[in-house]
Amino acid sequence: MILNIKQSKNIQNRSGQAVLFIVMAICILAFAMLWMADVHRIIFIKDRSQNAGDAAALAGARWQATAMNFVGELNLMHALASSMGDEVSVDVITNTQKRVCFVGPMTGVAAAQQAAKLNGIHVNDDFTAFMKEHADKIENEYATIMNGNSALPEPWPGAWYEYADMVRAIADDGVAAGVDNAIFYTDPMGAHPLLQIEFYEAIRGKNWCWFHFYGMHLLEEYDGYTWWPALPEQEELPLSSPEYLALHLRPIELRLSSIVKEGHPSIEAAEEIGIEITPRELDDTQDEVLENWFFYNSGRWGSWETMLDSSFPIEGDVRDEYNYQGADSVMRVEASSHRLMEDTKAHDTIIWTGAAKPFGYLDGEDNKATPNSVGLVLPAFRSVNLIPIDASSAPDGGSFNMKWRRHREYHLPIYMDAGPSALFPNCMYCRQLATWEIPEFRISGVEWLASNDWKCVISPPGGGPGGGTRHAH
């Protein structure tokens, strides 16, 4: 009887151990399933963000190509009208070109929003609020009347109000994709450490090698916020393109004889679309009139130097006819992935930036030439393709990195005036400046480099094999 009782207790103990083991196994399995669900969710949202960013960039680039081809065709129609002495048509054409340079890109921005939304990206409240603020800024600052003229010269009468309406219309529909290569008329342009996002990233990651290559004097010489040079003034940008998806075209006054002459590509381009241009003969009492023709802005349409750099991680060479910078479309999308493994408020922000560019060429007698080879805008663009973000015109940090933009616009001027006490604790970039102000931090960098600078090597741009990147392709 005593033996039976002992056996019964042993059986109960083993049963209890088995239940405990099963419970532990179920918990581990549940955590594993939740972890796999989180990983699957992140991968799914990243793929969706990539598709949306790339689709948005391509949509913007298509409208850039369409607008530039239309401006080119209008140049040819201008030549025809001018050769016939039709001054009224010439005036209508040139004024239409001015508007196309704005309407085409802004239609591209609207198309990019639709592409991003159709690929599952929701409206970004920060992007939307920023574009609404910018529409107000255009009306209240760009269009401010000073001495009978607007603060910024208008491409055509009432242009800034029409431009503001375009920006506001896009914002009212909700912005899902930010134009990450936007160039704003009032942004400070020029080299300054405080305007380089790499400076803040180097502080955050204690990347002393960045200072070794680009700013050793900062570590050695800095002695307080008054040491900084003044922030650069805004650069005078051509106002013939909008700030979003700019085409970088500009009107230049020339005579018809300079535009259409024997062997000039404009004659061949005109013949391709069925226009025959024969300059009219002028008698001794007539002078050839100077007229506005749309040209590529040579400062923006240079060779594609990044893609020609041997250190850039691409295979093959860029064809001569595609070796140009100029207009491109860069779109930033952000999506959130809520985790199941942690507090329901925890989430990951997934960012993807896609870049695309219009491509085309002019048919020469012996070979194909870049669209900008003759300066004059002609219908030449035939396709759009995705390009590496590091080969695009997007600035470091991007134009629609809202935290970075607000730091540059609002926090930096206050810091420059009042110093570290005016830094905003909720701003990540302000926190890096607070760290920078600590002398021991800078001294530690100098001491590390004194014995370890041999470890600093320059890596080629772009993501390495298997390393991953938020950038497209």
Image (cartoon, grey):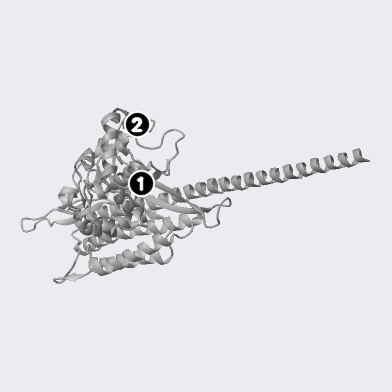
* SS class, disc 1: strand
Q: Is residue 456 left or right of residue 225?
A: right
Mark 1: which amino acid? Answer: Pro
Mark identifier at residue 434: none
**Inter-mark Cα distance, 2 to 1:** 18 Å
Give 188 or 309, whichever is nearer the viewer. 188
Q: Nearer the viewer, mark 2 or mark 1?
A: 2
What percent of the width, then of the height, locates residue 30?
66, 47
Question: How many C-alpha atoms fall within 10 Å of the one at disc 2: few (<14), some, or many (≥20)?
Answer: few
Is there any visible trace of residue 186 in the rendered image?
no
**Quadrant of the image occupied by residue 464:** top left
Work out whether 144 lies above or below 124.
below
Which residue occupies the extreme top position in the image? 454
x, y percentage for residue 295? 22, 50
User: Around disc 1, counting alpha carbons within 10 Å, would you say few (fewer than 14), some (14 to 19), or many (20 or more)?
Assistant: many
Label 2 element class = loop
Query: Horizontal and vertical percent for residue 120?
Result: 51, 55
User: In front here: 148 or 107?
Assistant: 148
In which image quadrant can residue 5 be found? top right
Q: Nearer the viewer, residue 336 or 286?
A: 336
Reply above or below: 447 against 384.
above
Nearer the observer, 261 or 214? 214
Could you tell me if residue 9 is visible in this image? yes
The percent position of residue 293, horizontal first and vertical second, equals: 21, 54
On screen, residue 240 versus residue 336, left or right, reads left
Residue extending farthest front: 2
Which residue is situated farthest in the right direction here?
1
Q: Which residue is mark 2?
A: 317
Instruction: Say which residue label 1 marks.
Output: 358
Query: Of the residues shown, which amino acid type is indicated by label 2?
Result: Asp
Q: Please give the name of the residue rendered at 37% of the width and 59% of the height, measured from the top-left corner.
A: 107
Tell me whether the residue at label 2 lies in contact with that at label 1, contact meaning CB atoms closer than 8 angstroms.
no
